[in-house]
Image (spheres, grey):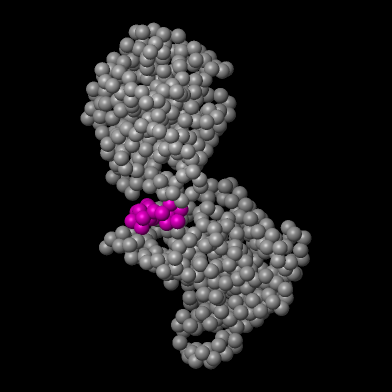
Amino acid sequence: MFGMIRVATALPPLHLANPNKNAKEILKLLKDANTQDIAIVLFPELTLIGYTLSDLLYQSQLLTAQNKALSWLLQNTKELPLLYTIGVVIKQANRLYNCAVVIREGKILGIVPKSYIPNKREFYEKRHFNSGASITQTSIKFLGELIPFGVDILFSDDNELVIGVELCEDLWALTPPSNQMASNGANLILNLSASNELVGKANYRTELVRTQSARLVSAYAYASSGVGESSTDTLFGGDAIIAEYGSIVARSERFSYKSQLISADIDLDKLNGLRLAEGNYSDAPQTPYRLISIGSLPRQKDIKRYIDPHPFVPSNPKERQAHCEEITAIQAHALIRRINHANIKRAIIGISGGLDSTLALLATWRAFNISKRKSSDILAITMPGFGTTSRTLNNAKSLCKALGVELREIPIDKLAILEFSAIGHDSNIHDITYENVQARARTEILMNLANKEGGLVIGTGDLSEIALGFSTYNGDHMSMYALNSGIPKTLIRYIVSYYADNFPNLSEVLNDILDTPISPELLPIDDDKIVQKSEDIIGPYELHDFFLYHFIKYGAKPSKILALGSIAFKDRYDSSTIKKWLILFLRRFFTQQFKRSCMPDGPKVGTINLSPRADWRMPSDAEFESWIEELGD
């Protein structure tokens, strides 16, 4: 469903050195997984016998019992459509190998030996096992079948899924085998592990899995042996982790004596799209790998994963606080660099009492503080017009006073009337001309004042408006430095809140600004109230930011964006409403590219940016019909 596949890590109760009992425990979990539409199940290292058997591994009876139990398991999983991976000992050429066996429908598809064999502190695997790192292009006779064997094996569904397998220490090595697997197309790495518990080790282990998934632009599933292992010298806690592109999406309960099956819906479509669009993934060297077909795996009928309705905004408060601090620093230092280079005396900024101009003014104020410039060298211009309310005007004035910047009030109504007269426009007709004349009048004032004062015009438009083209061409669309151009509307709210929380003298006015409806204030007011609300015209910004993220980040199809949006906003909007605004987003995104093609410089602050000099290039005359048609009726 929409490029998703359900992956699980399984932690069965372990019966040490008793493969028959372990096989039965494995089968129980596999049957449970099958009822949950799980496609892939990963078990820990040496699943059938246990990791901590030490010299019992030399006992031929143990290996005989293991292979018998494996044969029984193969026979009893012929009717299961899922794919699973368990750990076994393979005896080959009078050597023992610690291996992962990949199985589907009662058939072993391939066997991958462990490359890096630990032999330090509490681990002494080299006493028993050989490294399989050099084994390639090899098949072995096992359980009466000729089976691919080696570290050069990947497993593919011949579509969008490619699986690579490594074992425990392989991940901890200087150059994990999964690096090469990913460069050859693997987008899901399975790791069968036996990692003991030490103080602080769980956090380090989690970071290894998380960062490896980010580095490889992949999903990474990790399953480690549990408390059933021997505690003679060390304890195993049963740690299972599933990560996707740097985020932990599922985690087991450590130190549990019960069987566990944790699952997550992995977005392969997203991972594959990210690999096309980001980083230097395609530059990684490729080496010959054998690609084994696994057929079509079962796919879930629904999506069981959290879909963040506000992907630009960290949900964790501490992380969000740090995010805001970093963004404000980027804005401030980017502006300092520009002002110093241009030898600018003053910053010129139009301040309306709205969110965007408030953030731009705050960032400018911070830049001047950091660079030891006087706040009074910031020249804020409030330009009331036909739609300006006393609330926004008073908030603009209060904010400027609190910041200690110079404020000038220059009404634009007379200037706009002169423009109407010059072009022969009836001022009683409140159309696009009526609105844009006012927007361009304001920009003209700012630009001319910048020339007069030796200043730099600070742009206030944000990333959401840039995506939608919701600005007047050569009006508020234009500036000398677009300070907010990398920040979406949903995030701007939190940054302004950050300033309110950290500067008590600003909190009252900033909180009132946050409560004010978003408006360009270009249509005449009614009883001193805003009559023109942006979100009534173009739709909720939280929806458009959601659309923008999935559309740009990995090129999601409109139907997928709609499906994800219906999950993320299920308590706020119905699917038909989301679809209506998604169609508007697509139309505006394509038709308004001409404004982005000539947008002014501005700092990039996140992974998504629409500057034609940074992240996004497209022709201004590309057509959008294919995207609309993909949504269907």
Compared to residue 45, the image places residue 591 above or below, namely below
**Observer able to see residue 245:** no
Compared to residue 479, the image places residue 489 above or below, namely above
Percent of width and height locating residue 542? 46, 60
Compared to residue 87, the image places residue 317 above or below, namely below
Q: Which of 318 and 324 is in front in this view?
A: 324
In the rendered view, does 490 fall on the left or right side of 455? left
> Magenta span has 207?
no
Percent of width and height locating residue 96? 41, 14
Question: In percent of the image, x 45 and y 16: which residue is there?
Answer: 129
Question: In percent of the image, x 58 and y 29: which residue is there?
Answer: 200
Percent of width and height locating residue 223? 43, 29
Report which quarter residue 540 is drawn in.
Answer: bottom left
Report which quarter residue 450 is drawn in.
Answer: bottom right
Read off the magenta span.
550-567
Q: Which of 221 and 259 is in front in this view?
A: 221
**Observer able to see residue 273:** yes
Q: Is the magenta stretch mostly helix, strand or loop?
A: helix
Question: In percent of the image, x 52 and y 33: which residue is there?
Answer: 208
